[in-house]
Amino acid sequence: MRLPIRGAAAWPGVPMHPPTDAAEEALAVVRRVRATALDLLGHVGAAMFDLAPDDPAISTLSRYALATIDGTILAQRADGIAVEEILTHLPTALVAVHASLTHS
């Protein structure tokens, strides 16, 4: 099955409008907040694993941590799961990810 890529006719009932100025501004804010979060998580990861902040493993670990936090927030809002229930395991998961990065 081929999925249509573009065009209003390809997605009936879905408006195909370019983002508004407000949507673009909101996206810019989200990107700035995420960049700040990745930077902070990078410093935490560098200290946690005794690595330089610019080590490629830190980028991967930071993105993994942020994705976990993003997913946790979504699960909390959608399913009512307690944030602590998932984030309690984040340090252990980061150790496992770090181990897989250094042994691959």
Image: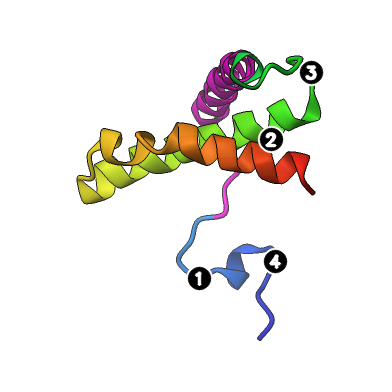
- Say if residue 89 shows up in the picture: yes
Residue range highlighted in magenta: 16-44
**What amino acid is labelled 2 in the image?**
Thr
List x then y, in percent, for residue 40.
Answer: 57, 14
- Residue to which mark 2 is pinned: 60
Seen in the picture, residue 25 relative to 74 is either above or below; the reply is: above
The residue labelled by disc 3 is 54
Question: Badge 1 is on which residue?
Answer: 12
Q: What residue type is labelled 1?
A: Pro
Whether residues under marks 1 and 2 lie with C-beta atoms below 8 angstroms apart, the answer is no
* Residue occupying the far left of the picture: 80
Instruction: Tell me which residue sits at (63%, 16%) in the image.
Output: 39
Query: What numbered label is drawn on residue 71?
Result: none
The local secondary structure at tag 3 comes to: loop
Query: What amino acid is at disc 4?
Result: Ile
Q: Which of 23 and 82 is in front in this view?
A: 82
Mark 4 vs 1: CB contact within 8 A = no
Label 4 – label 1 distance at C-alpha: 13 Å
| Few, some or many residues within 10 Å of mark 4 (<14, 14–19, 20+) | few
Closer to viewer: mark 3 or mark 4: 3
Query: Residue 29 location, x and y as percent?
Result: 53, 20
Alpha-carbon distance for marks 3 and 4? 37 Å
Q: Which residue is drawn at 56% across and 24% down?
A: 34
26 or 8: nearer the viewer: 26
What amino acid does circle 3 point to? Asp
